Image (spheres, coloured by chain):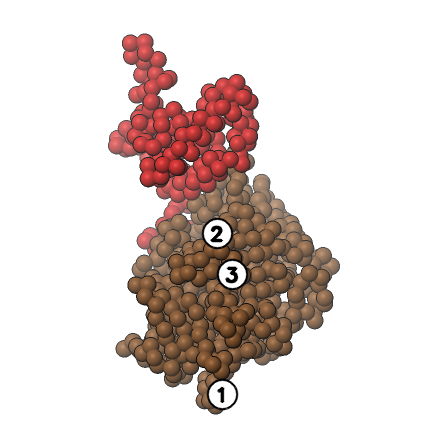
Chain colours: A red, B brown
Amino acid sequence: MRVLDKRTRFNRRNFLKTSAASVAAAGAVSSGVVSIAATPAWADALTAIKPDAAKTLLVMVRDLYPHDRLGDAYYEKALASMDQEAAKDATLAGQLNEGAVALDTAARKLRNAPYAAIPAEADRVTVLKSIETTPFFRKVRGDMVVALYNQPEVWAKLGYEGASAEYGGYIHRGFDDLDWIKDA
Amino acid sequence: MAAKFAMDDDSVVVVIGSGAGGGTLSNELAQKGIKVVCLEAGGRHEIQDFVNDEWKSFSQISWLDKRTTSGAWRVAKDFPNLPAWIVKAVGGSTVHWAGASLRFQEHEFKARTTYGEVEGANLLDWPVTLAEMEPYYAKAEFKMGTTGTNGIPRLPGNNNYKVLAAGAKKLGYTDFHTGNMSINSKPRDGRGPCQQIGFCFQGCKSGAKWSTLYTEIPKGEATGNLEVRPNAQVLKVEHDAKGRVNAVLYADGTGAIQRQKARIVAVAGNSIESPRLLLNSASTMFPDGLANSSGQVGRNYMRHMTGSVYAVFDRPVHMYRGTTMAGIIKDESRFDPRRGFVGGYEMETLSLGVPFMAAFLDPGAWGRDFSSALDAYDHIAGMWLVGEDMPRETNRVSLHATEKDKFGLPIPNVHFDDHPNDIAMRTHAYGRGSAVYDAVGAVRTINTPPYPSTHNLGTNRMSANARDGVVNKWGQAHDIKNLFVSDGSQFTTGASENPTLTIVALAIRQAEYIADQMTKREI
C-alpha cells in the first residue's frame, strides 16, 4: 500500500522561517537578558494583534486543535490569516486583543496564572470551557478550524494528498491498494 | 450555431435553472424542435475551471446568496446561513453531485398507503407509480450512462469501499456493490472513463461523471433550439389577466432587469429557490403566490434522514483516493417497521478531504478528542447514511419577514424539525454503520450529524388532488396550466434513494407531455 512520508521537508529557506529557528534565536541568552519576554519574530510580523495577545492566542489555538506533531509554524500561519482580517476590521482587532486579555483574566481567576503560563493542557481547557460561549471564543474557533486545516503542509502531515487531477487521479496511484483486509 | 431568442418572443419555453431537471428538460424540448430559453442564475464554469481544492471550489460554485434557518435541526445552530449546499452555476447541482443513480422502490411511490397514517407527518402517495416511471428510468440510465445498467460495468472498488464491503459481508448483508453510478467506467458518449480523481464534489475534471453542463446543455445548444443565459437570476414569474404565466423577470450579469416573454414557464431552481420564486411572484390575482391554492408551496421540505459514520482503523485507508462515493449497502432501504420506523435508508461510502472533515466531522467541536480524529485522517473510512425523512407541513421554505436580497425581494428561510421517525431511523443507521466498521476492527467510530442539505425536496409537491399539493403527475401546476415545476421540489415523498435519477426521469417524461400539449395547443 502506498503510504506517505510525513516528515517535514527542510530546506534552508523554510528552516529559517520555522518557529524552531525563531525560538532558537529568541531563546539565545545574551548578556544575561532573559528572553522569555522577547517578542518572537512571527508575533512581530502581525499588524493588528498585539504581541502579548499573540503569545496568548498561540497557546489558545494550539489548545483548540492540539496536534503534537504539528510545529507552532502552522498555528502561527493560521493566526496570521486572522491578523490580516483584523487589519481591515478594527472591531475584530479589538475583539481579538480584548479577548486575549479576558482569557488571561479568566485564567487567573480559575488557575491563578495567565493563560499561557498554566502548565497543564487540561487546566487550560477548563479555562477555555469557561469562555466557550463568548463571541471571541466562537470567532477564533470558527476561523481556526478553517485556517489551520486549509494548509497543504498540514495536509501532508495528516496523510492527505490534496489536488489529484493534475497527477492523473488515483487510478494508477493506489486508489484501491488497501492490503490489510482478508478477502477484500 | 448557438440560438438567440428575442426578449419579446412569446413562443419560447422559459426554463429556470440548468441542473438535473432544468438542463434535461431544456435539451429534451430542444431535441423535439421546441424553442427554449434556459435562465441560469450562476455563471458558466467549464471543466478546465474546476479546482481540486475544497474551499476554493466551495467559493466558486456554491449557492451563497443569503438564506436563514430556523427550527430544531442542528444545521440551524451550526450553519445558520447555510441550510443547503447546492450549486449556483450552469449544470446546477449536477456539477457537484456524487453520481449515485438509484431508482425508487415500488412502495416508496405509495408512502401513505404503505406506511399508514404517521402522526405529525404529511404523508401522501405520489400520483405516479413505479410502473409508469420505469420506461423513463430506463431512458435516464441510458442518457446518464449509469453503471450496472445498459451493460455498463460497475466501477472498481476503492480503499474506502473495500472496508465497507468487508464489514457488510461480516454482518451478513447481501445487497452491496460499487453502486449504480452515472460515472463512466469506460469511454462513453464522447467522455472518458473515471480517473478516480476523488474531487467529484468539486466538479469532475475528467468529464467521466455525468453533468448537464457538458452533456444536456451542449447537446441542446447544438440543435439551434436552446439558448442558455448564465448569470440570469430570476426574480418573478408574471402572468396575464387570465391567470396564465406569460413572462419571466430576471436580473442579468450587469444587474439590469430584463423581461423574457414566455409561452410556458418551467421552474427548476432547486427546492429552496423554486418555492421562493413562486411566493415572490404573488400578485393581486394570486395573493399567496403562484400555484398556491393548496397553501403547500414551500411546505413539506425534506432533506433526507442523513448522517455519517467515520471509523478509525489502526492501518491506513486513504479513503480520499478515488470517487467520493464508491459503493453502497442497500439492505436497510427496505420497509421493515420492526426496526422501529417506517421507510428505509441506504449506506453509501463517502470521503471528505481534511479541510471539510475539520469543518463537518463534528461542527463546533474542539480539543484533543476532536483533533485526535483528524490526526488519524489517513486511517479513516467513512459512509453517508441517506434515508426517507417524513414530510411535515411545518418544515418549510418561507419568505423572510424583513430581510431582502439586493434586488429588494425577501430572502428564504428554511425551517426544519426532525420527526421522531427521522430520529429513530438515524439512531438505527448510526448503529448499523458503526457495526459495519467494528466488524473490520475499527478502533473508534464517530457519528457525524447531517451536513447542510445536499438533497432538498418536496416544496412544490406532486399530488392527485389540487388541495394536497402544487403540481399534478406531470409536474404541471394545478392552478396554472402553462406553469411547470421540473426539479426535486416536485417530490411527494423523499424515498430512501438519492434523487437525481428520478429528477432526470421526470424531466424526460415531462418534456414528452409538454410537447404533446403544445401540439394540441392546450398550452
Q: Which residue is mark 1?
A: B522
Question: Which quarter of the figure has residue B470?
Answer: bottom right
Residue located farthest toward the top when viewing the structure as drawn? A32
Residue A109 drawn above or below residue A93: above
The residue carrying pointer 1 sits among few (fewer than 14), some (14 to 19) or many (20 or more) residues within 10 Å by Cα, namely few
Q: Amino acid at mark 1?
A: Glu
Q: Amino acid at mark 2?
A: Asn
The residue carrying pointer 3 sits among few (fewer than 14), some (14 to 19) or many (20 or more) residues within 10 Å by Cα, namely many
- Residue B341 % position (x, y): 69, 58
Q: Which of the pair A177/B520 is nearer the observer?
A: B520
Question: Which quarter of the figure has residue A149?
Answer: top left
Q: Which residue is mark 3?
A: B399
Q: Which of the pair B149/B368 is nearer the observer?
A: B368
The residue drawn where x is 36% and y is 55% is B60
The residue drawn where x is 56% and y is 72% is B292
In the image, taking residue B435 as reference, residue B412 lies left or right, namely left
Q: Amino acid at mark 3?
A: Leu
In the image, taking residue B385 as reference, residue B154 lies left or right, namely left
In the image, taking residue B457 as reference, residue A37 lies left or right, namely left
Q: Which residue is mark 2?
A: B81
